[in-house]
Amino acid sequence: MGRAGSKSSNRWLQEHASDQYVKQAAIDGYRSRAVYKLIELDQKDNLIKPNSVILELGAAPGGWTQYLSRQAGNKAVIVASDILPMDALPDVQFVLGDFTEQATADEITQIMGNRRADLVLSDMAPNLSGVGSSDQARAMALVELALESASEFLTENGAFAVKVFQGEGFDAYMKEVRNRFKNVKVRKPAASRPRSREVYVVARNLI
């Protein structure tokens, strides 16, 4: 790693160590600080309804999934999927695999009992290479896949919340989301680091 990379890495470590959300996650027993982004989205947009069917894409390590498990009630159907393994959680069915592959999609559908999801969530991001244009293209490819899956799995009046990075392709993506959903909002939760280009798109009611 070059000197610039070391500086960047050290800055991240210093930020992480002093981060109020990292400390709060340890106190609250959550696996990642990212959970506070979902908590804020839920508080603002009333995403998680009791006893609903919820699909979370790219769930590992499971911070968001923990919140879903705590909030949705034991009659909810919560399906979490990732290409990486994840430690089990109460009332959560975990599917290991690529959700874009038919076998994985079929397993998700089976667990949902052939019901449609009331909520589809995605906090996915690619492994970063450090090459901005390449990373952005890979990030946009992921959110496109998440949108396709939301269209496939959601009930007509369901909600879709997805992390999107502002940059090349963002405006076109927003146009596509608005073509598929009646109500679309862009959120920047307080737990998102200010210099991060990430925002969350919350969309409701398929057209």
Image (tube, helix red, strand yellow):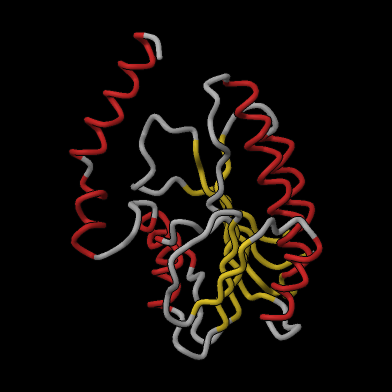
The residue that appears at 57% across and 64% down in the rendered structure is 56
In the picture, measured across the screen, residue 173 lies left or right of residue 18, that is right
At which x and y percent is residue 50? Answer: 49, 85
At which x and y percent is residue 104? Answer: 73, 65
Q: Give the farthest residue toward the top.
A: 3
Rendered-image quadrant of the C terminus: bottom right
Rendered-image quadrant of the N terminus: top left
The residue that appears at 34% across and 47% down in the rendered structure is 190
| Camera-nearest residue between 117 and 2 | 2
Compared with residue 125, is residue 25 higher up or lower down, i.e. above or below? Answer: below
In the picture, measured across the screen, residue 156 lies left or right of residue 117, that is right
Q: Choose top left, top right, bottom left or bottom right for residue 88.
A: bottom left
The residue that appears at 33% across and 52% down in the rendered structure is 33
At which x and y percent is residue 42? Answer: 44, 66
Q: Give the farthest residue toward the bottom.
A: 75
In the picture, measured across the screen, residue 118 lies left or right of residue 195, that is right
At which x and y percent is residue 95? Answer: 61, 68
In the picture, measured across the screen, residue 8 lies left or right of residue 72, that is left
Compared with residue 166, is residue 75 higher up or lower down, i.e. above or below? Answer: below
Total labels: the figure holds 0
| Camera-nearest residue between 101 and 167 | 101
The residue that appears at 67% across and 75% down in the rendered structure is 117
